[in-house]
């Protein structure tokens, strides 16, 4: 019994960490270039889950729904940046305050459009058995798939950032705006693209999370808080940092859920406080002044 | 020596005449329009106004982005609950609340040595959330999500207390009258003085005239007396605090706060230990936040729930500040008034314009409004008005051709 | 103020070194600045001059070495403590209070001299301490901005902003004044005015000056001594005359100056 719990907690922790990683990398990329802490990211995650649910209800194909939601996310993100954040260019505090408002508005819009009940898509609905038996323990199969999908996304993202032209531009921009300008990169267009990418990742994470967490109103806030914690613990601007930080927080979160539910949120928050005080640039971060 | 102190005090009063006038006006309200419903709402508005004011010290005036202000507020509220219900006198409970608010804010502020800007904001958010999540689970001392009954002090149920407050108000009115008489006697301000005196006389006269026997007998009931007393006390505390805070702005510390906001690094280079000054400001802000929390617990609520310590209230205060105009001191207070007033009356307004269902979408409406203000009115309502107003005043002054100069 | 005895050393650095990872920005710099003199630190871009200033003022902490001001070791001091010892600094990248008036920019700097008790007294008025206002006026006069004192700092021309930056550093009448490229960003016509302002300060208050400069006319008219840096290390030092005749320096400078 204990073995089953520990195994599930470990698997869940890793896959929850993968979700967090996809979510947090979007946050980190945006913060790296634009110095904007995007509070709306959490709401977009939730929106992604809901949209995936609706898309699946119409197409009955989960993979298509995921690809579509990624594309939709990129468009929504680019549109947001272009209309709402560009006018506030050069005033990062106001941009952050705006994303805070946006978080609320999107949250409420989701309630308005889909109602308070939310949409739950079980793993069976998308053609995956709920549980399989592994070494005598019942394991949730979808989460294993999620873990694999997460690693795949991580590899794809890594390849994108390090091997493609655009990716290099994104990394240069994240390091230093001046550096990017020296390379002749149009910062404003890059900003729109990056925000689009980040939001797309949030939507995608939301879609992936749908069969597990469901599309319910509170997911946005929970994920946002954990996402921020991951980014700060892992270190802003560090790919490996975000990955390892996500796994750490995911595992801590799931283990608390299984064995010590009272500290589910307190533990990650405490980790963040400690990291902020001892190593403000994050466990692996290169730090931004 | 006594002469100069007296002169200083008198000039303080003279400078704050508008604040005093507003105080007199608001305090005579229960006599002129004795609606318990409105008095309760206004009491809440004053409480949130003070909360917003305390936040402006940190964000607007010093430029420190803190997302944990609700911790000072909520802990202040619960401090009154814990201390008063343990049997200690009310004033001690309020003092504890203020102290706890200050200590909490200073504790968060110490992180400024290590983290700045957005990172500090995240730290304060985490700090406050940890406190909230932990205390929410301690149902024995906070009542959990259901909350506890607010510790409304008994002595405020005494109807005779109303007359004490009225006495204070009358004193303020007398002072204003003296000021108006004095300005009447000054050659240049005859008209102003005369008009002011007449208005004041009418107001006070009407108020006293409304004080008939039916109102007095209604005030005998403890619940009514409590509402009126609570309202008057909240008005007194808010106006007094506002005076103190605006006074602070004009002091050397106020100048330091503004300069730190403008260029903190240069302030360090020029010889100020900005870290220590920021801690002082956090402490002062925490004092007033704790006071507003105490006011919420004892005057303006029936049930006290742990979510007063949660990020929801921090978001509320951010909303008031942005709407009103950060850094203006009066802006966030007005922002609080406007938002909470609308909040209470959204149902009526919605029915009035024929779309009753939008009352359920208060959060959406206010969220959209907030986004619009951030985008279009970064200086907030009061901030933008101040900028436009200065230009209009200058234009008006030119148009009227000199006219009376304003002190 | 009587002319200080030139032999008295007001500031010294010993083997001051600062590394950023692999890169050595400042390497074993020994600097000795005598009272009442004007000492220029010159060198091509990237030589480590501004980093040296940051190390002296406490903005950066050195990897090795010491800084001494008036005999007191200030190596680990925070910037405000070093400022309290009478060290003032102006900045290469302008650092002013844009939304305050020109007068307030300098007055608030002077107010740092106020006793902490007065600074924290909520019932005193910021403007009742006239001595700070007077000090501000003096500093503004010396740099030539006195007539612009009620204006908001944001409306000034770049040259005037440069003067304001200097005035802020001058507010406390520092005994040691570090000027980081005082003619940077100043239009050609205004350079003599800036140099004149610095000369004015020397004449009136006789502080010790430590100067980072590129423009030869400024160096020639102001500096008594020079220290030449290249790639973090000192390659030559001496009186201005000696350095001018030093061939090695000419090579370094002419070869690599922007």
Image (spheres, coloured by chain):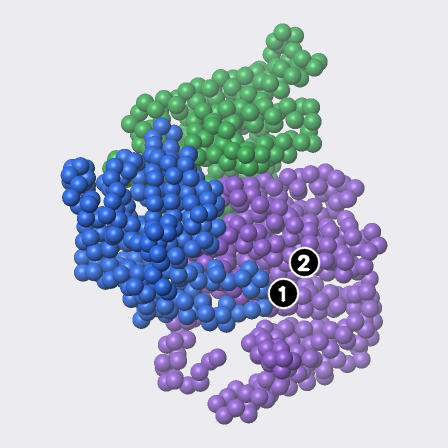
Chain colours: A green, B purple, C blue
Please determine if labels 2 and 1 lie on a single subunit. yes
Which of pointers 2 and 1 lies earlier in the amino acid sequence?
Answer: 1
**Residue where numbered disc 2 is placed:** B291
Q: In the drawing, does residue A164 fall left or right of residue B185?
A: left
Image quadrant in which the N terminus of chain A is located:
top right
Image quadrant in which the C terminus of chain A is located:
top left
What residue is rendered at 55% in x and 25% in y? Answer: A248
What residue is rendered at 33% in x and 28% in y? Answer: A167
Crowding around mark 1 (Cα neighbors within 10 Å: few <14, some 14 to 19, many 20+) is some
Q: CA distance from mark 2 to mark 1?
A: 9 Å
Quadrant assignment, res B126: top right
Q: Chain of mark 1?
A: B
What residue is rendered at 31% in x and 39% in y? Answer: C48
Which of the numbered marks, if any, corresponds to residue B241?
1
Q: In the drawing, does residue A276 fall left or right of residue A65?
A: right
Mark 2 near mark 1, Cβ–Cβ under 8 Å? yes
Residue B407 in percent (x, y) is at 48, 79
Q: In the drawing, does residue A66 fall left or right of residue B58?
A: left
Residue B178 in percent (x, y) is at 62, 86
């Amino acid at each position: 019994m204990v073995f089953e719990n520990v195994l599930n907690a470990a698997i869940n922790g890793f896959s929850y960490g993968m979700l967090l990683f996809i979510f947090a990398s979007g946050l980190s990329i945006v913060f790296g270039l634009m110095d904007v802490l995007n509070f709306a990211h959490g709401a977009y995650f939730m929106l992604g889950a809901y949209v995936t649910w609706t898309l699946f209800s119409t197409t009955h194909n989960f993979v298509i729904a995921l690809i579509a939601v990624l594309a939709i996310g990129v468009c929504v993100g680019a549109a947001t940046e272009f209309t709402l954040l560009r006018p506030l260019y050069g005033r990062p505090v106001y941009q952050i305050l705006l994303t805070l408002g946006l978080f609320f508005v999107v949250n409420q819009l989701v309630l308005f459009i889909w109602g308070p009940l939310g949409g739950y898509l079980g793993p069976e609905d998308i053609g995956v058995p709920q549980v399989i038996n592994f070494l005598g323990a019942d394991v949730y199969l979808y989460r294993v798939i999620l873990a694999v999908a997460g690693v795949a996304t991580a590899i794809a993202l890594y390849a994108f950032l390090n091997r493609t032209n655009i990716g290099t531009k994104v990394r240069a921009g994240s390091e230093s705006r001046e550096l990017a300008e020296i390379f002749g990169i149009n910062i404003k267009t890059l900003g729109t693209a990056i925000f689009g990418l980040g939001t797309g990742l949030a939507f995608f994470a939301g879609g992936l999370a749908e069969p597990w967490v469901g599309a319910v109103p509170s997911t946005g806030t929970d994920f946002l808080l954990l996402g921020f914690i991951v980014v700060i613990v892992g270190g802003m601007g560090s790919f490996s940092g975000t990955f390892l930080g996500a796994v750490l927080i995911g595992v801590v979160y799931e283990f608390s859920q299984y064995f010590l539910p009272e500290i589910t949120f307190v533990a990650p928050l405490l980790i963040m406080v400690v990291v902020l005080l001892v190593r403000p640039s994050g466990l692996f971060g290169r730090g931004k002044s | 020596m006594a002469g100069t102190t007296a002169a200083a005090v008198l000039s303080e009063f003279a400078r704050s005449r508008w604040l005093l006038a507003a105080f007199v006006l608001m305090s005579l309200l229960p006599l002129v329009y004795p609606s318990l419903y409105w008095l309760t709402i206004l009491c809440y508005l004053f409480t949130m106004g003070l909360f917003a004011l305390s936040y402006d010290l940190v964000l607007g005036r010093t430029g420190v982005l803190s997302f944990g202000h609700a911790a000072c507020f909520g802990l202040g509220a619960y401090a009154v609950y814990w201390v008063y219900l343990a049997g200690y006198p009310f004033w001690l409970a309020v003092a504890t609340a203020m102290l706890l608010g200050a200590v909490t804010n200073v504790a968060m502020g110490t992180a400024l040595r290590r983290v700045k800007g957005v990172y500090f904001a995240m730290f304060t958010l985490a700090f406050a959330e940890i406190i909230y999540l932990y205390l929410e689970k301690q149902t024995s001392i906070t009542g959990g999500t259901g909350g506890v009954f607010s510790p409304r002090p008994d002595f405020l149920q005494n109807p005779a207390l109303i007359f004490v407050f009225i006495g204070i108000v009358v004193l303020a009115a007398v002072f204003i009258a003296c000021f108006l008489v004095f300005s009447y006697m000054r050659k240049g301000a005859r008209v102003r003085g005369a008009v002011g005196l007449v208005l004041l006389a009418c107001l006070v006269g009407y108020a006293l005239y409304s004080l008939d026997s039916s109102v007095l007998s209604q005030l005998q009931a403890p619940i009514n007396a409590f509402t009126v007393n609570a309202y008057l006390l909240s008005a007194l505390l808010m106006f007094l605090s506002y005076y103190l805070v605006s006074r602070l702005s004009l002091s050397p510390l106020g100048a330091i706060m503004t300069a730190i906001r403008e260029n903190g690094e240069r302030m360090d280079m020029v010889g100020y230990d900005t870290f220590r000054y920021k801690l002082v400001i956090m402490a002062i802000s925490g004092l007033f936040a704790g006071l507003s929390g105490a006011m919420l617990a004892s005057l303006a609520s029936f049930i006290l729930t742990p979510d007063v310590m949660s990020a929801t209230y921090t978001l509320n205060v951010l909303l008031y500040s942005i709407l009103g105009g950060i850094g203006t001191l009066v802006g966030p207070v007005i922002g609080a008034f406007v938002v909470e007033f609308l909040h209470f009356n959204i149902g009526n307004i919605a029915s009035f314009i024929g779309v009753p269902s939008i009352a359920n979408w208060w959060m959406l409406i206010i969220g959209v409004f907030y986004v619009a203000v951030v985008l279009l009115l970064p200086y907030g309502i009061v901030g933008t008005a101040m900028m436009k107003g200065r230009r209009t005043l200058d234009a008006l002054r030119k148009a009227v051709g000199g006219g009376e100069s304003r002190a | 103020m009587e002319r200080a005895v030139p032999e008295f050393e007001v500031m010294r650095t010993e083997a001051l070194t600062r590394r950023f990872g692999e890169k050595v920005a400042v390497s074993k710099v020994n600097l000795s600045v005598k009272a009442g003199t004007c000492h220029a630190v010159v060198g091509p871009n990237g030589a480590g001059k501004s980093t040296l200033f940051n190390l002296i003022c406490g903005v950066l902490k050195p990897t090795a070495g010491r800084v001494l001001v008036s005999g007191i070791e200030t190596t680990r001091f925070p910037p405000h403590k070093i400022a309290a010892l009478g060290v003032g600094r102006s900045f290469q990248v302008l650092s002013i209070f844009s939304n305050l008036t020109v007068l307030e920019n300098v007055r608030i700097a002077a107010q740092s001299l106020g006793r902490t008790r007065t600074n924290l007294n909520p019932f005193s008025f910021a403007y009742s301490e006239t001595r700070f206002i007077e000090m501000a006026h003096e500093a503004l006069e010396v740099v030539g901005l006195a007539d612009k004192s009620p204006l908001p700092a944001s409306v000034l021309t770049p040259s005037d902003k440069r003067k304001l930056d200097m005035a802020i550093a001058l507010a406390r009448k520092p005994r040691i004044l570090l000027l980081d490229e005082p003619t940077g960003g100043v239009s050609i016509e205004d350079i003599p005015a800036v140099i004149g302002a610095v000369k004015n300060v020397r004449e009136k208050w006789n502080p010790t000056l430590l100067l980072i400069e590129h423009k030869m006319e400024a160096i020639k008219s102001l500096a008594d001594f020079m220290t030449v840096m290249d790639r973090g290390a000192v390659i030559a030092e001496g009186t201005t005359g000696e350095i001018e005749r030093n061939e090695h320096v000419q090579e370094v400078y002419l070869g690599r100056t922007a």
